Amino acid sequence: MKNKISVIGGGSWGTAITYLLSNKGFDTSMYLRDEAVLNNLIKTKENKKYLPGVILNKAKFTNKIEIVKDCDYIVLATPSSAIVSVLDDLKKYINDNAVIVNLAKGFEPKSQRRISEVSKEILPKNDFVVLSGPSHAEEVGKDIPTAVVCASISHEAAKKVQDIFSNDKFRVYTNNDLIGVEIGGALKNIIALGAGMSDGLGYGDNTKAALMTRGIYEMSKLGIVLGANPHTFTGLSGIGDLIVTCTSMHSRNRRAGILIGKGKSKDEASKEIGQVVEGIKTTKSAYELSLIHKVDMPIVRKLYKVLYEGMNPEEAVKTLMAREKKAEIEQIFFE
């Protein structure tokens, strides 16, 4: 096959996608900076640190960013907080026809911009596609059936990515609502933190169901104001990703939330998880966006207070429950 692909990032998700694409027969390289992980991959074909048990027999590994020079697709599998520096590095070598495929779920933390907005500024000539949905790396690496969605302002680019990534165990849908898919993928991590805190506090299914339902509502409210299609939040990048992230122990955000619910700080929880917990920084970005756009997001507001102002998680739940009584659906959904 002629398509040449570089996956930028050697974490669990980058490893799973490298496994998927290389096994389809594409010329696939993984770029990573961690020399210990790189050397281990070269020797054993296994990322024992981030995704043990998944063997990458058909991929190549490098710490040379120049690998992207002749690539048709560049897959971003780095934390959203690193996206500016990564794109700055790429622009020195990338060709104008290469398609950017983003896996990160979050905002650029200094500006609260979506990743597509940052990419458009730094790489204006390159089509941008986001891939999102309920997809734990641990399961993709085991060929467990998974469905995701890709979105772009370019329908042609989205269709190309759909074809490149799809196989009989990994089904890819397309969506023209780039904003909604990005917002859903980012904000579900916040609600998963809250779901984990609920578990850490010893609350039950009723609490988590309420949190998830009202959480998807808050995601939709902000998304609509930012220009998203509300129906997107009922799909794979909204409810689908929310369900899997709030209920699975594969979820870093849920696991971090459990630790915080049991009394640890956000920094202590992140250190124990050992990988980036996107929901922590995303909570700050979403809170700031809610203020800028005057969107009432009580769950996000309380989680911000827990994470950044030291509020007790149990007190946060009590104040959420004691808020002024209101109707379930607000006028924004009918305008």
Image: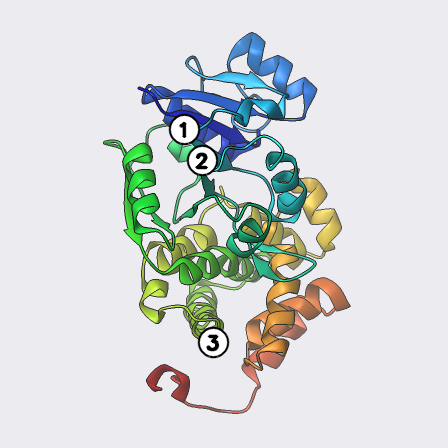
* In the rendered image, the vertical position of residue 99 relative to residue 191, given as above or below: above
Cα–Cα gap, marks 2 and 3: 31 Å
Nearer-N-terminus badge (3/1):
1
Which residue lies at the image location 32% right of the left edge and 57% below the top edge? 176
Q: Circle 2 sits on which residue? A: 98
Residue 141, numbered circle: 1
Nearer-N-terminus badge (2/1):
2
Position of the C terminus, as image quadrant, is bottom left
Which residue lies at the image location 57% right of the left edge and 25% below the top edge? 31
Around disc 2, counting alpha carbons within 10 Å, would you say few (fewer than 14), some (14 to 19), or many (20 or more)? many
Count how many numbered circles sit on residues in the image.
Answer: 3
Where is residue 185? Give x, y as percent.
46, 55
Which residue lies at the image location 65% right of the left edge and 48% below the top edge? 81
Where is residue 138? Give x, y as percent.
45, 33
Tag 1, which secondary structure?
loop
Where is residue 103? Give x, y as percent.
48, 43
Tag 2, which secondary structure?
loop
Tag 3, which secondary structure?
helix
* In the rendered image, the vertical position of residue 211 relative to residue 261, given as above or below: below
In this orientation, which residue lies closer to the viewer: 309 or 202?
309
Q: Nearer the viewer, mark 3 or mark 1?
A: 3
Nearer-N-terminus badge (2/3):
2
Around disc 1, counting alpha carbons within 10 Å, would you say few (fewer than 14), some (14 to 19), or many (20 or more)? many
Which residue lies at the image location 26% right of the left edge and 31% below the top edge? 167
Q: Amino acid at mark 1?
A: Gly
Q: Nearer the viewer, mark 2 or mark 3?
A: 2
Q: Amino acid at mark 3?
A: Val
Residue 225, numbered circle: 3
Q: Nearer the viewer, mark 2 or mark 1?
A: 2
Residues at circles 2 and 3 in contact by the CB criterion of under 8 Å = no
